[in-house]
Image (cartoon, rainbow, N blue to C red):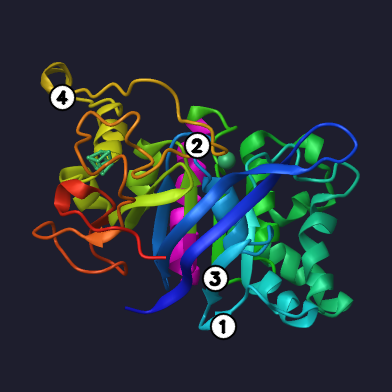
Amino acid sequence: NDVLVRARDLQVHFPVRSKGLRRKQTGAVRAVDGVDLDVLRGETLGLVGESGCGKSTLGNALLRLVEPTGGSVEFDGTDVTGLSARALRSLRRRAVMVFQDPYASLDPRMTVGQTVAEPLQVHGLRSGSRPARVAELLELVGLDPSVASRYPHEFSGGQRQRVGIARALAGEPDFVVCDEAIASLDVSVQAQVLNLLRSLQRELGLTLLFVSHDLAAVRHLSDRIAVMYLGRVVEVAPAADLSADPQHPYTRALLSAVPVPDPARERSRERIVLSGDVPSAARVPSGCRFRTRCPAAFEPCPTVDPALQPVPGAHGGDLSGEHAAACHLHGVVAVSR
Ligand code: SF4
Ligand code: MG
């Protein structure tokens, strides 16, 4: 398997300081806390979990929009954790973010054409060639090129998100992170933007990391899905296998909350209700971080931190394409670090 983005033991810890003058560091919020993840070239990888699980921080860290505090990120074979400013510029072109809020992420004083052209200037496209490229990008996202002279307030949320996507694609990136890219849109518009992302992914051969709290939306779009809990990837699998044969108790709970369209199955299906909220990332439980909410917790769980391991029998394999989970139910294996 061809890996485009590889994270190993990736950490993003934010210091917590005491109040007052000395502001001593008293702890850390472990937003991303030892993530192992491979994103394969040309795939759509869904990243799901409740809010506060570190999904956005992970997405940002993979793009180096936030600085990792430990571990490594490789992009196309190059470790990007220690890149020079110059090398970082090339990463900025090849790996981009589509933001959650199309209202907040577009400058209201710039026309749509200027917004989409801005990265072209940054990437050094001659000014004479920019209008044609802007028209091409607008068409690519299903907008009429004549809208280039208009302002964001003249557009609906879905159209603005299309503009945001056009801008993200301006530098012909390889890797696109969509962070809750449809969450702020009307339900009727969400499907259109999802379909657009799916067709762009295919047409342009993009590698897509689709970050969402909405497992149902992610399932339709993704080739594989990674489930995140409290700063860690706890399960990763091909999308169909994750739905049909979830291995981690947290994944089972998330899936059991997704409504089933068939009323007969809806009545009979198993529903797992998790007790309590996600613990604070400043106080991650010892051993398995899910144990405070896990209906299956047993003897090793409070002391041994489970490693992400291939699941025997469940389309077993490795981190790149096969089914892996971090749970002692599949054999007690401690994280080694
Ligand atoms: Fe539950 Fe233990 Fe598995 Fe953690 S390791 S998910 S607590 S059974
Ligand atoms: Mg988020």
The residue singled out by tag 4 in the image is: 270
Which secondary structure lies at badge 2? helix
Q: Residues within 10 Å of mark 2 (few under 14, many from 20)?
A: some
Q: Can residue 142 be seen in this view?
A: no
The residue singled out by tag 3 in the image is: 73
Amino acid type at image mark 4: Glu
| Distance from Cα at disc 2 to Cα at disc 1 | 35 Å
User: Residue 101's quadrant in the figure?
Assistant: top right
Q: Residue at coordinates 32% horizontally, 33% vertically from top-left? A: 254
Left or right: 227 in relation to 311? right
| Distance from Cα at disc 1 to Cα at disc 4 | 45 Å
First in sequence: mark 3 vs mark 4: 3
Nearer to us of marks 2 and 4 is 4
First in sequence: mark 3 vs mark 1: 3
Q: Can residue 158 be seen in this view?
A: yes
Magenta stretch bounds: 188-208
**Marks 3 & 1, CB-CB < 8 Å contact:** no
Q: Residue at coordinates 23% horizontally, 28% vertically from top-left? A: 295
| Distance from Cα at disc 2 to Cα at disc 4 | 28 Å
The residue singled out by tag 1 in the image is: 78
Q: Where is residue 299 in the image (x, y as percent from the top left)?
A: 20, 39
Amino acid type at image mark 3: Val
First in sequence: mark 3 vs mark 2: 3
